[in-house]
Image: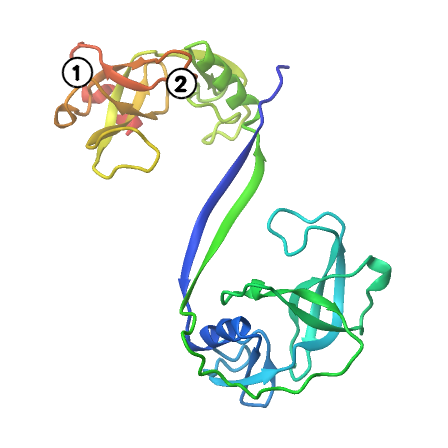
Amino acid sequence: MPEVLKAPLVVEFPFTRSLGPVQSAFLTGLRERVVLGVRTGDGRVLVPPVEYDPVTAEELHDLVEVAPTGTVTTWAWNHAPRRGQPLAGPFAWALVRLDGADTALLHALDAPGPDAVRTGMRVRVRWARERTGAITDIACFEPHEGGPPRLTNRTGGFEEPVTGIVAAARLDYTYSPGRAQTAYINALAGRRTAGERCPSCRKVYVPPRGACPTCGVATAEQVEVGPRGTVTTFCIVNIKARNLDIEVPYVYAHIALDGAGLALHGRIGGIPYDEVRMGLRVEPVWTQDARYPDHYRPTGEPDADYDTYKELL
C-alpha cells in the first residue's frame, strides 16, 4: 500500500470581543495590580468575575477587591510547555482560591518541580512587568509564606478602562487525507484526476472519500475521469480574498468531470465572468510544477444538455 500523505497545518485568526462592565473592571484592575471579584446575592465572591450568577442567573455588578495571595486547591504538573503558555520551563497548572474569594482562578504556578507543589500551599501573584489589561498581566503564581497584604478596597472606577480584547486563536495539527485522497492527490501530481467507484451503486466519487456516502460500503476501485467536464452551477465572486492574487470579479463553479458521479469545484477562466453558464464545457489549465489545475477554461464544445448533468446539481 502506498504511503499515506500527512502535513502540518495551522489554523490561526485574531478573535476580537468587547467587554461588559464587569470584565472591563476585572482586566483594567489587573493592569493596575488589583484583583477584583464580583459578589453574588448570597454573599459569595466569584473570581474571575462573571456578569450573571451561575446559579440564579441574576445580573451581577457588585465588584469587590480580593487579595493577590491565596491557596492552591488542586494542580497538575506541565512537563513540556507549549508555544504561548505562560512560562518557558516546566510549571504547574493550579487552581488558586485567592484570599477573599469563594472560587478558584486557573493560572500557572512557578515551582522548581512537582515535589515542591502541594494542595493547600500558599501562593501569591507575580505581576508582569508590562501590563496591558489582560489575564497575562498575572505572569504566574509563586510560592508565598506570608499572609494576605493590606488591600486598597478598589471597586473599579479606573481611568482609561479596557473595553475590548483581541485574543489570538491558533490550532496546530497534523492532517492526513487518508488512503483514498492520498491516491487522488498523487494522481493530480501526474495531471490525472482519479476517483473511486462504489461497488454497489457504481457511482464514481471525485474526490474519493474511501466509502460511498449513499450505500455505506468501502470503495477501492480507482477510475480516471475527465479531464473535461461540465459546469453544473456557479457563483460570481466580487470580494477579493486576502493573499489570493486573483482580480475580482471571477467565477467559482461546480464542475462535473466526464465519468464522475459528483461535481468538484474550481475557478473558471478564459471567458468573461458574465458569459459563464450552466452546461458550459470546460477543461483544466495547469501551470508549471502545479499539483492541481489552476483553473478551468471553455473547450469550445457545444453546451451540455441539461438532462446530462441535472442529477449532479
- Disc 1 marks a residue whose amino acid type is Asp
- Disc 2 marks a residue whose amino acid type is Tyr
> From what the image shows, is residue 63 above or below residue 7?
below
Q: Residue furthest front?
A: 129
Residue 178 % position (x, y): 57, 26
Q: Quadrant of the N terminus?
A: top right
Residue 220 % position (x, y): 54, 17
User: Is residue 74 at least partly visible in the picture?
Assistant: yes
Q: Earlier in the sequence, mark 2 or mark 1?
A: 2
Q: Secondary structure at mark 1?
A: loop
**Left or right of 308 on screen, residue 84:** right
Residue at mark 2 = 292
Residue at mark 1 = 303
Q: Residue furthest right?
A: 115
**Left or right of 139 on screen, residue 121:** right
Residue at 44%, 22% (x, y): give it: 201
Foreground: 225 or 215? 225
> From what the image shows, is residue 52 above or below residue 215?
below
